[in-house]
Amino acid sequence: MILFRSFLYQLFFIGSSILFSSAILLIGWTKPASAVSRLGRAWARANLVALRVICRLEYRLHDFERLPCEPAIVLCKHQSAWETIALRALLPLEQTWVLKQELMHIPFFGWALSYLQPIAIDRSAGRRAVTKVIREGERLLGEGRWVIVFPEGTRVAPGTRRPYAIGGALLAERTRCPVLPIAHNAGCFWGRRSLIKRPGTIDLVIGPLLSVQGMKAAEINAIAERWIESTVEKLPNPNDVQESLL
């Protein structure tokens, strides 16, 4: 039954992505950016509802009141595709994502992404990719947009770790924009590169807003990483999920 529900949701995900991407492509060149952002948020919220109804996969927010009114640089744990949906739905409307440029080539979905003003980088470009994040991130923060960064660079399975890239922290050092760390355990329910979405409740925790005044990028990165990883360790792990389903 879990496999059937997961497959059914996958059909919804593909269909909704084509539908909303087509709408963005139709209006993106004539409407203001806020209209495109609203379509992006509507797509994400529709998918969260579909996950709840079809897969019985829900979420629980912790410390959501920590979300600031002013734009911030978000450093988020990356375990699954779920957080790429949830952050679009739950964070303020105007968002810019740092993402791999290969996503821009996906028919419909990738083409529509360009209207959401991402910072698309070549992950093999090294310093040039970091320079692009800083240059474009500074401009977009100045326009009032939030910048969303997955510092691990790729999805990481629960219980494993990957070094945090420093691009987001360098952007914070350059702009003095505060950093908001976010932790979650989505990978326990929706694994990386997995079709299966297990029923349950994902915990998403908003961290304390980090003022970066007088701090260097390495220190910013270390503080954010320490909080994210220690928080993730306290959240339910795959064994806890299995026990809860027995």
Image: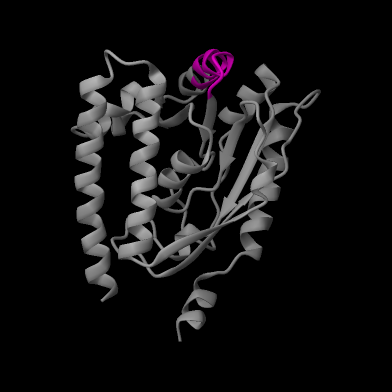
Give the residue drawn at x 70%, y 48%.
226
In front here: 185 or 127?
185
The x and y percentages for residue 103 are 30, 34
The x and y percentages for residue 194 are 32, 60
Please state the total of marks drawn on the protein image.
0
State the image quarter where residue 161 is shown.
Answer: bottom right
Residue 134 part of the magenta segment: yes
Q: Residue furthest right?
A: 214
Give the residue drawn at x 47%, y 18%.
128
**Quick one: quadrant of the N terminus?**
bottom left
Q: Residue furthest bottom?
A: 246
State the image quarter where residue 84 is shown.
Answer: top left
Figure check: 224 above or below 31: below
The x and y percentages for residue 189 are 43, 65
Give the residue drawn at x 54%, y 63%.
159
- Left/right placement of residue 184 relative to residue 192 reads right
Camera sees residue 55: yes
Q: How is the image coloured?
A: one colour
In front here: 82 or 22?
22
- Left/right placement of residue 146 relative to residue 106 reads right
In front here: 111 or 86?
86
Give the residue drawn at x 22%, y 70%.
4
Main SS, magenta region, reads helix
The x and y percentages for residue 153 are 47, 40
Residue 163 part of the magenta segment: no
**Quick one: quadrant of the C terminus?**
bottom left
Find the magenta span and give its range: 133-145
